[in-house]
Amino acid sequence: MTVMETTAAAAEAGTRTSVCSAPPAGHRRPAGQDKYTISEVVAFTGLTAHTLRWYERIGLMPHIDRSHTGQRRYSNRDLDWLDLVGKLRLTGMPVADMVRYAEMVREGDHTYQERCELLEATRRDVRARIAELQDTLAVLDHKISFYGDAGRAPASERS
């Protein structure tokens, strides 16, 4: 089942689910057995091991469990979080704001309002960028149409 299907099914059932679920459905392990190595997470996410370690070091990732030998063991929840971080990166949200958001999540429910305000500001920025890109696309469409029409005109009409 795709993320969209899962979200739609949850909406129909009246339950809430994250639209930012990360691991590919075929790779997700059952709860309690969801321990992924850093190399598996690299394969799932496309992030480098260095980036994953950096996310943890700066506080963007929550505490990552370790095996008895000290190797990181990521859970489905960690993969969900990484997917959300990836979406926030795509919005252009500064890393400092992502870290601040992560800190607020860890602080608990009393930060809902602040989190909402941060996400609303990011949404405004994304909408402004989309509008800018739509304007740019209109210019490109106009130029493509101009050159397409010029190429179809007889040589005598082009001069």
Image (cartoon, rainbow, N blue to C red):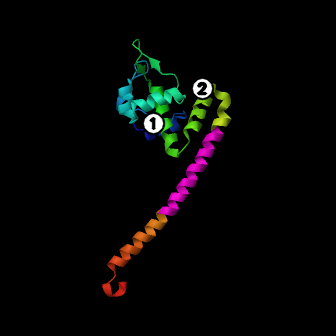
Q: Is residue 6 visible?
A: yes
Splitting the image into 4 quarters, where does residue 99 fall?
top right
Q: Position of residue 128 (x, y in %)?
A: 58, 54
Residue at point 59% right, 49% down?
Answer: 125
Question: Which segment is the magenta one?
Answer: 116-136
Q: In the rendered image of this protein, does residue 89 appear above or below residue 38? A: below
Whole-percent x, y for residue 154 in the image: 31, 84
Q: Which residue is mark 2?
A: 106
Q: Position of residue 137 (x, y in %)?
A: 47, 62
Question: Amino acid under label 1?
Answer: Thr
- In front: mark 1 or mark 2? 2
Amino acid type at circle 2 is Arg
Quadrant of the image for the C terminus? bottom left
Say which residue appears at 59% left-offset and 45% top-offset.
122
Q: Which residue is mark 1?
A: 6
Residue at point 52%, 45% (across, down): 91
Q: Earlier in the sequence, mark 1 or mark 2?
A: 1
Q: Is residue 115 above or below residue 143?
A: above
Horizontal side of 122 relative to 46 (left or right) equals right
In-image side of 21 versus 37 (left or right): right
